[in-house]
C-alpha cells in the first residue's frame, strides 16, 4: 500500500526548476551527494549545452533521468503559432531522446482569444502531429493537466478526466498522463480517474509539492510538502495502489525558496519528503 510513510530516497526525483539557482551540473552533484535517486531536467537547464553530454553526466553520477520538462503549448488562435509549436515540440522530442529519458512532460497550452473546446481540439491535433516522431524516438508524451486557474493561457486540460479522455482518443502506449498534486488535489473525481489511468496503463509520472494559504503568486508560490493543505500521502496511495511504481518528483516553483540558501532548501526537501509525502 502506498499510504505507508516513505523510508528512503531511492524514488525521490527533483526537478532542476525546483533548485533553479543551481546550474544543471551543480544540481546533479548536490542531488547525488544528498542521496536523491532521480532528476527531471527542464529545457532551460540545457541551454548552451549538449543534451547528450548532460544526459551522460547525470547518468554517470548515478541519477535516473525521469523526464524532460517540457513540451506542449499547442493551442493558439494563429495558425502560424500552432505550426511553430509543433516544430518546437519536435525539437523537444529530439532533446529527450538525446538525454535518453523516456518521458517528455506536456503542458498543453490555451489561448484566451478562443474557446477551451477549440484549444483542446488544437492540443489533440498537435499531439497527433508529433506522435509518430515520439513513437520512433521511444519518447512517451505525458499529458499534465494544470489547475483551472491556468485555463486562460497555459492549459485547456484542467482535470485528469480530460487528460484520460485525450489519452483514450490518441490510442498510443506512448501517450500517458501525469498526476501533479498541486494541480489536481481539489478534484472530487481524482481517485476514480487515477484508477482509470491505472487500468489503462497510462500513469506516467507523479509530481509533488504543496498548496499554501494564502498563495501569494499564482505561479511562483508553491510550498514544500507539509506546508499546505494537499493530502499528498493519500494521493500517492491512490497512484501506487493503481500500479504506479515510478519516482516521486518534487516540483516547487517558489520565489521565496529560490532566494534562500539552496543547500538548506535541499535539506528541507529531503526531510519533508520522508515526513509528508
Ligand atoms: Zn508538474
Image: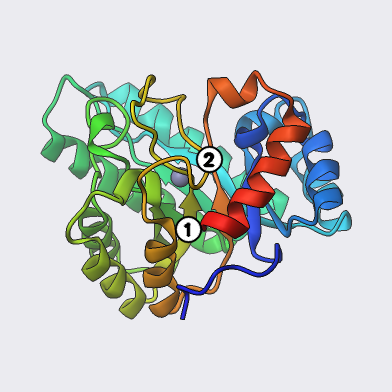
Tag of residue 85: none
Question: Which residue corresponds to the image point at 51% horizontal and 74% vertical from the top-left?
Answer: 4
Tell me the residue at 17%/58% (across/down).
Answer: 188
Q: Residue 201 location in percent, x, y?
A: 39, 76
Residue 2 on image: x %, y %: 47, 75
* Dot 2 beta carbon under 8 Å from ligand 1: no
Residue that mark 2 sits on? 224
Q: Residue 148 sits in which quadrant?
A: top left
Please state which of residues 168 and 128 is positioned toward the viewer in this rendering. Answer: 168
Residue 91: quarter of image? top right
Q: Nearer the viewer, residue 167 or 64?
A: 64
Residue 151 lies, in percent from the top left, at: 23, 32
Q: Nearer the viewer, residue 120 or 67?
A: 67
Nearest to viewer (mark 1 / mark 2)? 2
Q: Residues within 10 Å of mark 2 (few under 14, many from 20)?
A: many
* Circle 1/circle 2 CB separation < 8 Å: no
Under circle 1, the secondary element is: strand
Q: Which residue is mark 1?
A: 206
Task: Determine the residue positioned at 80% across, 56% down.
Answer: 35
Numbered label tally? 2
The numbered mark, 1 or 2, whose residue comes first in the sequence reads 1
The 10 Å Cα crowd at callout 1, few under 14, some 14 to 19, many 20 or more, is many
Residue drawn at (19%, 44%), measured in percent from left and top? 121
Q: Give the left or right position of residue 32, taking residue 100 as reference.
A: right
Above or below, 209 against 73 in this view is below
Q: CA distance from mark 1 to mark 2?
A: 15 Å
Q: Secondary structure at mark 2?
A: loop
Position of residue 141 in the picture relative to residue 264 (left or right): left
Position of 143 relative to 95 (above/below): below
Q: How is the image coloured?
A: rainbow
Amino acid at each position: 500500500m502506498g499510504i505507508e510513510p516513505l523510508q528512503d530516497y531511492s524514488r525521490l526525483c527533483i526537478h532542476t526548476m525546483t533548485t533553479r539557482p543551481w546550474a544543471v551540473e551543480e544540481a546533479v552533484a548536490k542531488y547525488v551527494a544528498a542521496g536523491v535517486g532521480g532528476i527531471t531536467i527542464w529545457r532551460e537547464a540545457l541551454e548552451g549545452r549538449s543534451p547528450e553530454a548532460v544526459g551522460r553526466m547525470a547518468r554517470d553520477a548515478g541519477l535516473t533521468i525521469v523526464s524532460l520538462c517540457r513540451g506542449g503549448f499547442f493551442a493558439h488562435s494563429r495558425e502560424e503559432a500552432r505550426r511553430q509549436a509543433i516544430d518546437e515540440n519536435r525539437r523537444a522530442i529530439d532533446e529527450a531522446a538525446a538525454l535518453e529519458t523516456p518521458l517528455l512532460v506536456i503542458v498543453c497550452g490555451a489561448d484566451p482569444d478562443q474557446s477551451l473546446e477549440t484549444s483542446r481540439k488544437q492540443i489533440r491535433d498537435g499531439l497527433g502531429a508529433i506522435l509518430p516522431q515520439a513513437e520512433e524516438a521511444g519518447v512517451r508524451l505525458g499529458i499534465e493537466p494544470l489547475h483551472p486557474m491556468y485555463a486562460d493561457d497555459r492549459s485547456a486540460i484542467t482535470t485528469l478526466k480530460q487528460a484520460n479522455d485525450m489519452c483514450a482518443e490518441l490510442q498510443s502506449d506512448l501517450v500517458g498522463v501525469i498526476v501533479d498534486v498541486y494541480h489536481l488535489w481539489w478534484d472530487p473525481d481524482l481517485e476514480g480517474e487515477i484508477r482509470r489511468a491505472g487500468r489503462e496503463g497510462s500513469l506516467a509520472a507523479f509530481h509533488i509539492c504543496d498548496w499554501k494559504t494564502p498563495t501569494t503568486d499564482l505561479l511562483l508560490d508553491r510550498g514544500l510538502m507539509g506546508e499546505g493543505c494537499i493530502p499528498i500521502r493519500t494521493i500517492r496511495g491512490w497512484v501506487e495502489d493503481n500500479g504506479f511504481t515510478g519516482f516521486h518528483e518534487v516540483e516547487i516553483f517558489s520565489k521565496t525558496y529560490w532566494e534562500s540558501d539552496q543547500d538548506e532548501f535541499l535539506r528541507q526537501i529531503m526531510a519533508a519528503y520522508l515526513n509528508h509525502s
